């Protein structure tokens, strides 16, 4: 009976350790995705801003 309890306790501890590892992996994945988004915003920010500025000036000239 004691051996069974040891096996059950060890199995539960192993599952808890795996949960921690998977949480760290998900955290790293989210951090990587955030880094890609930040890089894309910095690389494409000027292009998008100029496109919106051109569109805004064209709309403004047509309304007057």
Image (cartoon, rainbow, N blue to C red):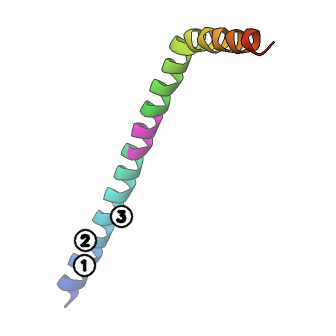
The residue tagged 1 is 8
Residue at horizontal 41 percent and vertical 51 percent from the top: 23
Quarter of the view holding residue 2: bottom left
Q: Are marks 2 and 1 in contact (CB under 8 Å)?
A: yes
Q: Is residue 5 above or below residue 42?
A: below
Element class at badge 2: helix
Dominant SS in magenta: helix
Query: Compared to 49, does 26 lie above or below?
Result: below
The residue under label 3 is: 16
- Write down the region rendered in magenta: 26-31
Q: Position of residue 41 (x, y in %)?
A: 54, 20
Counting from the top left corner in percent of width and height, residue 44 is at 52, 13
Q: Residues within 10 Å of mark 1 (few under 14, many from 20)?
A: few
Rendered residue at 28%/64% (across/down): 14
Q: Position of residue 58 (x, y in %)?
A: 68, 10
- The percent position of residue 30, horizontal first and vertical second, equals 45, 39
Q: Is residue 43 left or right of residue 17?
A: right
Q: Quadrant of the N terminus?
A: bottom left
Of residues 17 and 63, the one nearer the viewer is 63
Task: Depth check: give the residue in front, 19 or 56.
Answer: 56
Q: CA distance from mark 2 to mark 3?
A: 9 Å
Which class describes the residues within 10 Å of circle 3: few (<14), some (14-19), or many (20+)? Answer: few
């Amino acid at each position: 009976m004691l051996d069974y309890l040891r096996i059950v306790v060890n199995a539960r501890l192993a599952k808890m350790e795996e949960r921690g590892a998977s949480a760290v992996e998900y955290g790293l994945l989210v951090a990587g995705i955030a880094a890609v988004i930040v890089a894309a915003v910095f690389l494409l920010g000027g292009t998008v801003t100029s496109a919106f500025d051109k569109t805004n000036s064209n709309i403004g000239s047509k309304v007057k």
